[in-house]
Amino acid sequence: MEQNGIFHAVCPLDCPDQCGLLLHKKDGKLVKVEGDPQHPVTNGHICNKVRNMAERIYDEKRLKYPLKRIGPKGDGKFTRISWAEALSTITSRWKELIKTDGSDSILPYSFYGNMGRLSAEGMDRRFWNRLGASQLDRTICSSAGSVGYKYTMGGSLGIDPEDTIHSKLIIFWGINAASTNMHQVALAQKARKQNGAKIVVIDVHKNQTGRLADWFIPILPGTDSALALGLMHILFSENMVDQGFLEKYTVGHEALREHVLQYDPASVSKMTGVSVDDIYKLARMYGEASPSFIRIGNGPQHHDNGGMFVRTVACLPALTGQWLEKGGGCIKGNSAYLAPNTEYLQRPDLLINKHTRVINMNLLGEALLTLDPPVRSLYVYSSNPAVVAPSSSKVRKGLEREDLFTVVHDLFLTETAKYADIVLPATSSFENTDLYTSYWHHFAQIQQPVIEPYGEAKSNVDVFRQLANGMGFDDPLLQETEVSMIAAALDNPQNPYLEGINYEALVKEQYMKAKVKPMFPGKLPTPSGKIELYSKRMKVDGYPPLPTYIPLENDGEHPYQFVPGPNHNFLNSTFSNNQRHIELEQEPRLHMNRKDATAQGIDDGEMVRVWNNRGECELKVSVGENVLPRVVVTQGLWADTIGGKQLVNSLTPERIADMGGGATFFSGRVSVMKM
């Protein structure tokens, strides 16, 4: 905690890159954030989001002390109170609710606004288990794809991203990596320069990543699994598969060969909007290039059929034997390599209400409005559901309930916090001690406090310790120190990849690489120990055992498929309240194909109304060829930051995806009309 100097840190954002940082301090304050040039993967390069973090931390709008609501819900009128009053108000109310409505009338709502293991899934989970609150199924981001990938590969295991510099063909499938995984783009560009690698991007929108590709392939939303099956059809029919690999390391390749006969290029072209010629071209590129690498993105898994998409695409590297090549294979995620002892962190054994209900976070609006018995109290941290949750208009209607006691712990008075009864100021990650484990690269990292807490801000860990005291919980596990929790979390006998990584070593080294070995030869954590092209487990679970294209569910008669993807300068709603980031991003736009715009008499730059039965938005239109006809795309969660109607998640369905309880943000339909 020296007043001046340069100190190591970790980017806390929900991003696969998890950059190493250097923080510059002067007179005790953070004055500059830069990348750590010694970090083996991120190499000192960081994005605008993190580069401007000092401005965010000292933003005059940042919360300094606890607040109590004094006006109508949603108006954002509060008065200052002490921590003692805030904690007493919360715990007293909860004690009353437990007596009258039961402990599961209380619902936590959180996600990975801070990716620190302690902040996101440590003391909080212990507290909620001991309280007996309703359990939140945290499935809003990658759960559908994770389940789908697990059916094929057994767990969150891909190749080392550092090896992708050896790839000859790199396919970014459904990921705007330039905005959401920038160091994978840097590795791809290095492979392009060194090996002449070709970069192919498959997406519904020609975004920044699509523009840097050697070949951009536009596709209709939700049809990605059909394209993957069409590629398999050609790979088998033109004998571009590695028969030796299939026989030694997979199960079900004979059945798959027969199954994909129905996915001929002509049929797949009608499903996907990709031409027959392009399907053949892509299949032959993939069949002939080695090593070839697929970066599987989050985008397509946010459809009704998202889990099956990831399950299907994950089969492709097996067909051509790419797992045996350095730089060959795929990455959906790599979190299994750095998996800590989550049972110790979360302590499910503390759960006093063994039959407590589980509420899917994508159904928050429905839970607040229709659940019986009702949710009586909501505690929100590391998330902003009034903006990020599906069917956001319904969520806000639920938050308006006067009988709902809501507490929000955050750095800012977010859109959700404006509906709260009590608002608590949160520390930034640079004010905490925490453990960070990337879900893309193989390095664990440590964060120690670099600056003093801002105002009266407290960390998630500290607040839950104090709430435990207020509730009269005397279990020592609810008062454990951060250092002790990290040390125990890294002691995971179920994960041999963590060998040699411990708290003391991390403090000394700052980042340490998991001891990862090539998957092949070896045994996968699937039932067969092999890549499961045919999955008996899927059949038992009620899914087709072979990769199958399942069209999207009916979402009404609106003519346009609507995809609200991420933008470059926000991360979900984080940074959307910062003027510098708003200026960088300029304004929300609806991307529309020229053919559709002409048919409706809409000119580039005009304002349009976008609506369905769930809500409506008003957006400026960008007319061009960046999306296919009958597809509209917008980027970023602008929410209430610029006024007007830009809450795009008011249009998104709250249906649950095919696997893992995942979200279906990108499976909605809308109408568009010039204003």
Image (cartoon, helix red, strand yellow):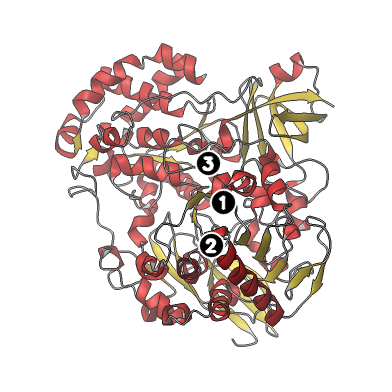
Q: Give the alpha-carbon distance from disc 2 to disc 1, as whole Å.
A: 9 Å
Q: Name the residue: 29% across, 73% down.
A: 500
Task: Residue 297 in the image: state x and y as whole percent.
Answer: 47, 41
Q: Seen in the image, is 410 located left or right of residue 339?
A: right
Task: Residue 134 in the image: state x and y as whole percent.
Answer: 51, 58
Q: Seen in the image, is 556 located left or right of residue 316?
A: right
Q: Is the Cβ of the residue at disc 2 closer than 8 Å to that at disc 1? A: yes
The residue carrying mark 3 is 663
Say what amino acid the circle numbered 3 marks: Ala
Q: Seen in the image, is 49 located left or right of residue 601?
A: left
- The answer to whether residue 427 is seen in the rendering is no
> Which SS class for mark 3?
loop
Mark 1 closeness class: few <14, some 14–19, many ≥20 residues within 10 Å: few
Q: Quadrant of the N terminus?
A: bottom right
Q: Please state which of residues 605 and 285 is positioned toward the viewer in this rendering.
A: 605
Q: Please state which of residues 413 and 38 is positioned toward the viewer in this rendering.
A: 413
Kindly indicate the quadrant of the structure image that contains residue 384: bottom right
Task: Residue 573 in the image: state x and y as whole percent.
Answer: 66, 52
Q: Give the alpha-carbon distance from disc 1 to disc 3, as whole Å.
A: 24 Å
Say what amino acid the circle numbered 1 marks: Pro
The residue carrying mark 2 is 102
Q: Earlier in the sequence, mark 2 or mark 3?
A: 2
The residue carrying mark 1 is 373
Q: Is the Cβ of the residue at disc 2 closer than 8 Å to that at disc 3? A: no
> Which SS class for mark 2?
loop
Q: Give the alpha-carbon distance from disc 2 to disc 3, as whole Å.
A: 29 Å
Q: Quadrant of the C terminus?
A: top right
> Which SS class for mark 1?
loop
Label annotation for residue 579? none
Q: Earlier in the sequence, mark 1 or mark 3?
A: 1
Vertically, is 83 above or below 635?
below
